Amino acid sequence: MKGSNIVLAAEPRGRFKEGYISGTGLLPGMCVSTTATPMRSGRFTYAAAAADAPDITVLREDSLQGFNAQGPYQDGNRCLAYTPAAGEEMNMMCASGFTPTIGALLSVGAGGTLVAATGTAQFKCMEAGAALTANALVFCETLGAVG
């Protein structure tokens, strides 16, 4: 993890979003997708992204309510999210068992965490470390528009 935020760019080029959470156990840095739930207060509802989902949005820390990148979202709560542009640096939630290696290619796995890419890579790991014993935030770079 680099710094204390999810989006690390000084001048982000992606799109900031707000919405609502559907599900439990969602943390900043996880990938989410819009659900079929009708809009609420003009905002979409987001749930954990499916493996290799093409329309990726990343949950951000809810700094408006004083939460940091470790603060979990609760089902039905308002959320802050971000759809990154190519080349942006972010702290992303990687799945337990992944060994961070600089240059390792990653894609979205089940539950919205990143795993070693088996198909189209969407992110590149930018730090090295020991195998993760639990899901954890890892410094990554986006490889293309993921949302």
Image (cartoon, rainbow, N blue to C red):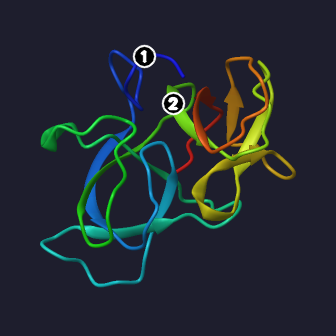
Q: Quadrant of the N terminus?
A: top right
**Residue 26's spot in the image, x, y percent?**
45, 58
- Name the foreground residue: 44 vs 30: 30
Q: Residue at x 53, y 54 (%)?
A: 56
Please, what is the three-letter code of the amino acid marked with disc 1? Gly
User: In this figure, which residue is indicated by the disc labeled 2?
Assistant: 91
Q: CA distance from mark 1 to mark 2?
A: 8 Å
Q: Quadrant of residue 127?
A: top right
Across and down, in percent, residue 94 comes to: 65, 42
Local secondary structure at mark 2: strand
Tell me the tag on residue 119: none
Horizontal side of 93 relative to 108 (left or right) equals: left
| Residue 46 higher or lower than 115, as above or below | below
User: What crowding class fits label 1: few (fewer than 14 Cα within 10 Å), some (14-19), or many (20 or more)?
Assistant: few
Which residue in the protein does label 1 denote?
A: 3
| Residue occupying the point 26% across, 72% down | 76
Q: Quadrant of residue 10?
A: top left
Q: Is residue 89 above or below residue 82?
A: above
Q: Secondary structure at mark 1?
A: loop
Image position of 131 with respect to 101: above or below: below
Determine contact: label 1, label 2, CB under 8 Å. Answer: yes
User: Which amino acid, by three-letter code, is at mark 2?
Assistant: Asn
Residue 102 is situated, as x and y percent measured from the top left of the image, at: 77, 18
Looking at the image, which residue is at 42% across and 16% down?
3
Circle nearer the N terminus (1, 2): 1
- Which x, y percent locates residue 67? 24, 39
